[in-house]
Structures are given as C-alpha cells and as structure tokens.
C-alpha cells in the first residue's frame, strides 16, 4: 500500500536543514573573521600585544549596533567582531529553525520548549548589554 | 611580543587544543583558558570570552557533521537546553560577582574532575525496557539504526538529568567551557541515554549553551576581537581535523596523556589562583 505523503517535514528533513544551517553559519563567520584579521594585522601587526590587564572592550564593540558601525567603517577589529557575532547567532538561528520544524510536525509542546530557549538566548544578546 | 607573533602563537596553541579536544572527546575549551592565562599571561576574563567563542565554533562545526548521521535526539537536546541556557545565564552573571582568583580555583577544580572522568573508560549504559512516564510524556524516548535493526531506547530520571544540565550550563557560563563532560555524565549516568546518542546530542547543545553566556560576555566587554580571532580560527581548524581522523586512531592512550595534561593545568590554575597571580 502506498502512503500518501503529507506536506509536513519529517525529523530527517529538519535535521538536514539544521546541519546545513550550522555549516553555513560557521563558514560565513570564519570568512568574515578572516577578512577582519587581514585588515587588523596589516594595520596593527607590529604593535605590542598586551592582554595582561583587563580594561574591557571599548564601548562600541560591546553592542550589536556598535559592532555593525565599526565593521562598516572597515575597522579590522570591528569586522572580526561582526564575524564573532555571526558565530554567536548561528546556534540562535538553529533554535529558531527548530521552532519552525516542530511547528511543521505539529508538535506544540516542543514549539513551546524551543520558543522558551529562543527567548533566553535573545534576552542574553539584547537584554543584558 | 608583537600582535602578529601573538596571533600566530595563539592560533597554533588553539589548533592543538581543538585537535586534542576532538580526538579525546573532551572539547578544546578546558585547555584554552589555562593555555591563555598560564602561558600567554592573558587576563582570565578575556581568556574566558575567547574560549566561549572557540566553544561555539567547535560545537557548530562538529554538530554540522554529526547531525547528518541522525543519531542525536533533537527533542532531548531542546528540552535540556532550557536548563543549560538558564544555567549559562546564571553562570555568566555570577562571573561578574566573584573574584578572578575564585574563578581560577573553580576552573582548576573542574579540570581535576574532568581529568578523573576522562581517564576512566566510559561505562556502557543499558537502556531500560520499561518506559518512564515523565520521559514518555515529554516525548524524549527515541530510536536509532544499528546493523541489527532499529534500536529503541527509553530515558529515565528526567528531573535529575535536568538539574545536572543546569549545573553544566552554569559552569559553562562561569568558566567559558563547553561542559561536555558534565552534559554527557547527566545523559549517560542519570538519564541512561545510549552512548552514541548522548555524545552527539551533548555536542549539539554546547553551542546553544555557550551562545547564551556569550551575549552577556559581549555586553560586558570580555570578548576581544584581537584575541578571539586566532582562538576561533585555530580551534575550528583543529577540531575539524580531529573529527576527520577520529575514527582512525587509537584514542585510549591519547585520553590518558590528555588527562595528565589537564591534571597538571588544573593544579597550576588552583596554585596561581590561591597565590593571587590570576
């Protein structure tokens, strides 16, 4: 007997999608970080490195808006920080995608769980800086 | 040391950490912070920020490879991520309240614990044949293909596993590590997840957990691009190379050697923390 396939995603398809998303996120962020590294090292490579004393990152590179601004003005450290933000955003996107996946599977309980995780992650990114 | 030399050396160190972390299954995070603080004299707060970034890179990179094999349980992962992300937020907030010396000593203690866990061969857990009502209600039971056919497994002791996961998240947020060892412990010992499923599911969760504390660290200025750049790129290259050759090498001796290294680093972290050097 041939089963009629419903237009819902299977676990398998969701997992494949998640795998591709993770890979794309890592490759993209690594490429951006590498670009920033070239600019940063070309300009500051001969300066002395010193991380002994903690003074915190300057205000601009602590917020998403500030990082975008620094990257668009082609500062090496700004571009690197943008790449790192993309890296941090990859797992967040994964959770968001899982919500869609669970919704397509009509799994309300897990749509709820994944939404809760997403809220916690967004709070960490936007609510604390 | 110039920025250029520093970048190259940190890159090499991170690549080795990532490689060993992947080969031994312990993750590179546990050695990154001691490496940066003890050898490169980096302030532990910068080191933790950079390590978190490295942890996310490793987890996402490896998970991309593992997810395709279809042995991670996305429901178990998502359910437990509620605990790990809440724990990670707690840990990250705690990190601002306690002294760097206290963080160093805690780190050392965790290293000693990990060394003991790593040296001990993992006990193959047997899955119960009787489903646990709570695990069933939460749809945590699953199955995976084996050469002998589909194998079903039933999880148990969900509250214990959930609590342990909160602790794993808190350690991750406080110390900038993946806490893979604690995550696997929670799933293996408490919830009786099959070996294959717990390893990949844990890896899957590590990135999300680290992202939860990374946001807090970013806002606090702990994530320095100049330091995080070589760490991220190094760990990524090392761990990807590690997962490629994972199947081909005998890892028992490697685990023992790595455990010894972690033991030494742990003792050094505790000593430096108590001596007020960190």
Image (spheres, coloured by chain):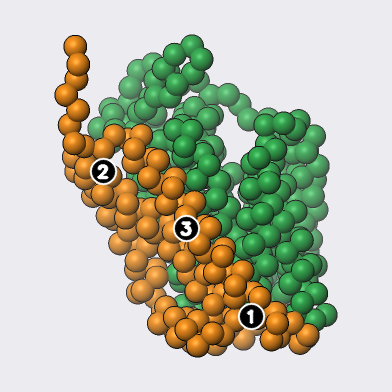
* Res A39 label: 1
- How far apart, in angstroms, are the residues tagged by discs 3 and 2? 21 Å
Instruction: Judge from the rendering whether residue B140 lies leftward or rightward of residue B54; answer left or right.
Output: left
Please name the residue that numbered disc 3 is placed on.
Answer: A25
For mark 3, does the 10 Å Cα neighbourhood hold few (<14), some (14 to 19), or many (20 or more) residues?
Answer: many
Query: In which chain is the residue bearing label 3?
Result: A
Please name the residue that numbered disc 2 is placed on.
Answer: A102
Q: Which chain is green?
A: B
The part of the image, by quadrant, that contains residue B266 is bottom right
Mark 3 residue element: helix
Sequence-earlier tag: 3 or 2: 3
Q: Which chain is orange?
A: A
As drawn, the residue found furthest toward the right would be B1
- How far apart, in angstroms, are the residues tagged by discs 1 and 2? 42 Å
The one nearer the camera, B254 or B43, is B254
Mark 1 residue element: helix
Query: In which chain is the residue bearing label 1?
Result: A
The x, y position of residue B22, in whole percent, is 66, 44
Q: Classify B207 as above or below B121.
A: below
Instruction: Judge from the rendering whether residue B41 lies leftward or rightward of residue B81; answer left or right.
Output: right
* Res B238 label: none
Badge 3 vs badge 2, beta-carbon distance below 8 Å = no
Q: Classify B256 as above or below B195.
A: below
Closest to the camera, between mark 3 and mark 2, is 3
The part of the image, by quadrant, that contains residue A76 is bottom right
Please indicate, yes or no, whether residue A86 appears anywhere in the rendered image. yes
For mark 2, does the 10 Å Cα neighbourhood hold few (<14), some (14 to 19), or many (20 or more) residues?
Answer: many
The x, y position of residue B124, in whole percent, is 58, 24
The one nearer the camera, B86 or B29, is B29
Same chain for the residues under marks 3 and 1 in the image: yes
């Amino acid at each position: 007997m041939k089963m009629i396939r419903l237009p819902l995603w299977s676990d398998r398809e969701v997992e494949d999608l998640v795998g591709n998303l993770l890979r794309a996120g890592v490759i993209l962020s690594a490429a951006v970080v590498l670009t920033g590294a070239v600019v940063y090292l070309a300009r500051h490579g001969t300066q002395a490195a010193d991380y002994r004393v903690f003074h915190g990152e300057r205000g601009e590179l602590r917020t998403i808006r500030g990082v975008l601004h620094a990257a668009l003005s082609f500062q090496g450290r700004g571009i690197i920080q943008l790449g790192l933000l993309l890296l941090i955003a990859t797992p967040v996107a994964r959770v968001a995608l899982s919500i869609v996946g669970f919704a397509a599977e009509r799994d309300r309980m897990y749509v709820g769980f994944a939404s809760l995780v997403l809220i916690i992650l967004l709070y960490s990114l936007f609510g604390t800086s | 040391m110039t920025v250029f030399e520093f970048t190259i050396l940190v890159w090499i160190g991170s690549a080795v950490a990532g490689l060993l972390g992947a080969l031994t299954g312990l993750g590179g995070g546990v050695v990154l912070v001691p490496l940066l603080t003890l050898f490169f004299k980096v302030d532990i707060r910068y080191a933790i920020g950079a390590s978190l970034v490295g942890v996310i890179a490793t987890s996402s990179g490896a998970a991309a490879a593992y997810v395709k094999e279809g042995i991670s349980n996305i429901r178990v992962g998502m359910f437990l991520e509620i605990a790990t992300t809440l724990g990670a937020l707690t840990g990250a907030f705690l990190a601002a309240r306690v002294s760097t010396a206290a963080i160093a000593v805690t780190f050392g203690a965790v290293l000693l614990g990990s060394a003991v866990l790593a040296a001990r061969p993992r006990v193959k857990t047997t899955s119960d044949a009787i489903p646990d009502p709570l695990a069933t209600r939460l749809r945590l039971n699953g199955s995976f293909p084996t050469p002998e056919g589909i194998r079903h497994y039933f999880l148990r002791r969900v509250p214990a596993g959930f609590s342990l996961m909160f602790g794993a998240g808190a350690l991750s947020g406080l110390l900038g590590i993946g806490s893979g060892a604690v995550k696997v412990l929670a799933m293996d010992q408490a919830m009786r997840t099959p070996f294959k499923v717990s390893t990949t599911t844990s890896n899957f969760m590590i990135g999300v957990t680290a992202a939860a504390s990374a946001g807090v660290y970013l806002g606090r200025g702990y994530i320095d691009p100049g330091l995080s750049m070589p760490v991220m790129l190094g760990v990524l290259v090392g761990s990807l190379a590690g997962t490629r050759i994972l199947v081909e090498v005998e890892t028992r001796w490697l685990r023992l050697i790595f455990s010894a290294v972690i033991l030494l680093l742990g003792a050094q972290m505790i000593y430096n923390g108590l001596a007020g050097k960190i």
